Amino acid sequence: MRKCQLFFLVFIGISSLTYSQINEVKLYDLNTNLKSRSISFENPTGEPGEGGKAPSGIGIGRKGAPRKLIKANEEVILCNIKQSGTIRHIWMTGEFIDFFWTEKIEGRNKLLRSTVIRVYWDGQEYPSIECPLGDFMGLAHSKITSYQSAIHSIGELGALNIWLHMPFTSNAKITLTNESDVEFYFYYQIDYTINDKHNNDVGRLHVSFQRQNPTTLKEDFVLLPKRKGKGRFIGVVLGIRTLYPDWWGEGEIKFYLDGDNEFPTICGTGSEDYVGLSYGIQETTFLNHGCNLNFKSDSIVSYRDYKTNELKEMNRDYVSMYRWHIADPIYWKQECRITIQQIGCCDYYERKDDWSAAAFWYEPIPSEPLSEFPSLEERIKDLDELLTIIR
């Protein structure tokens, strides 16, 4: 009995560890050379004593520059830090002139897919992160849902947070580009430390975005194109829009590591199984895995059955789900490629749907350029049905 009690106490202690404790951050250690910095429109350089200097109607330093109007097709440099450090948290939100950016207004509800974040590490000329803002912040389909995971926390009115550490040795440059034809107000804060001692080959965060609408029959969707050299896969935000009825998620995820050719080293058992769920998909969120959107539209749409070629009717499903490999790391030394199948059920059959993926991983630089980034039209196509529905 005493052994069982001891096991229970140890288990509770382990399961209640915070993300910081898992990453061996000693919260009580004050003997550090690290210095805390933060960049926002109130202090765009992050330099000591330079925050809150902008004037407002009630005086200098009285909330003079909390936000900026981002015009259509405008690129804004959010930070350009020129020393060693680690970005530890990013918060962002936005609004239009007269209402929140979560409002269901035509042309404005695709903002999280049409706005792009790009990150350049340590002088590399091309970005290591190139992703729609929403997918980077844990939301597929440009649809805001409030939830928390090990990496993200999302407020119901569009407060976006990412807590994944992002080390750099000499420079961190982040840009935000509004590729839409509307303007909006934008707020942000980048919290980081300087004087971090990183090896030159420390893993820099990389994020790429893929979308296939539709996928190709009998061809696996590539959520991480081949990367060469060493690295660690952190996880993925997946979006699925069904183009055919019935269960879509019997496809297996496959990790091709270090010389794998036809068959992978790591092979899953189903799409919902990969995100830690089972027997279909349920809208439920956990620290390292889950589904934050599982929505079946009331609208009836037509589709052509590719088995019989008959014209039929269906209601589309929209799913956003995620999986983070914090406690169960996936490393490679030479190369990595990750795919996922599109297989239906109950009797297994090949199908095609609309899939997107924001893949997160660490690798050193110099690194190869990311795969080709989808165009604005490719990113926002066919999202109106979901984004005009108030849930």
Image (cartoon, helix red, strand yellow):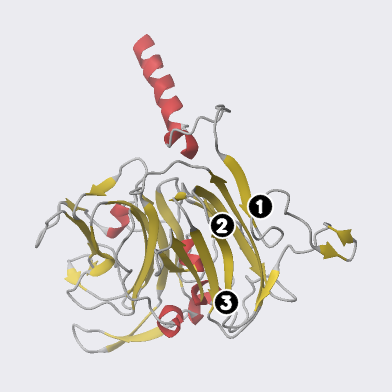
Q: Amino acid at mark 2?
A: Ser
Looking at the picture, tell me which residue is in the foreground, 254 or 309.
254
Query: Do labels 1 and 3 touch, CB within 8 Å?
Result: no
Please rate how many residues cluster around mark 3, counting C-alpha atoms within 10 Å: few if below 14, some from 14 to 19, many from 20: many
Q: Amino acid at mark 1?
A: Glu
From the top left corner, tell me how far across and down residue 68 is, in percent.
69, 70
Q: Earlier in the sequence, mark 2 or mark 3?
A: 3
Looking at the picture, tell me which residue is in the foreground, 197 or 369.
197
Image mark for residue 75 = none
Please name the residue that numbered disc 2 is placed on. 146
Q: Secondary structure at mark 3?
A: loop
Residue in view at x 36 percent, y 16 percent: 4
From the top left corner, tell me how far across and down residue 231 is, in percent.
28, 52
From the top left corner, tell me how far across and down residue 63 is, in percent.
80, 59
Please name the residue that numbered disc 1 is placed on. 47
Query: Do labels 2 and 3 touch, CB within 8 Å?
Result: no
The quarter in which the N terminus is drawn is: top left
**Image quadrant assignment for residue 229:** bottom left
Q: Residue 190: tell me if it is visible.
A: yes
Front: mark 1 or 2: 1
Q: CA distance from mark 1 to mark 2?
A: 33 Å
Q: Secondary structure at mark 1?
A: loop
> Taking 14 as reference, is 296 above or below it?
below
Q: Residue 342: tell me if it is visible.
A: no
Please rate how many residues cluster around mark 2, counting C-alpha atoms within 10 Å: few if below 14, some from 14 to 19, many from 20: some
Q: CA distance from mark 2 to mark 3?
A: 16 Å
Q: Amino acid at mark 3?
A: Asn
Q: Secondary structure at mark 2?
A: loop
Q: In the image as oriented, which residue stretches furthest toward the right?
A: 58
Q: Earlier in the sequence, mark 1 or mark 2?
A: 1
Residue in view at x 66 percent, y 52 percent: 47
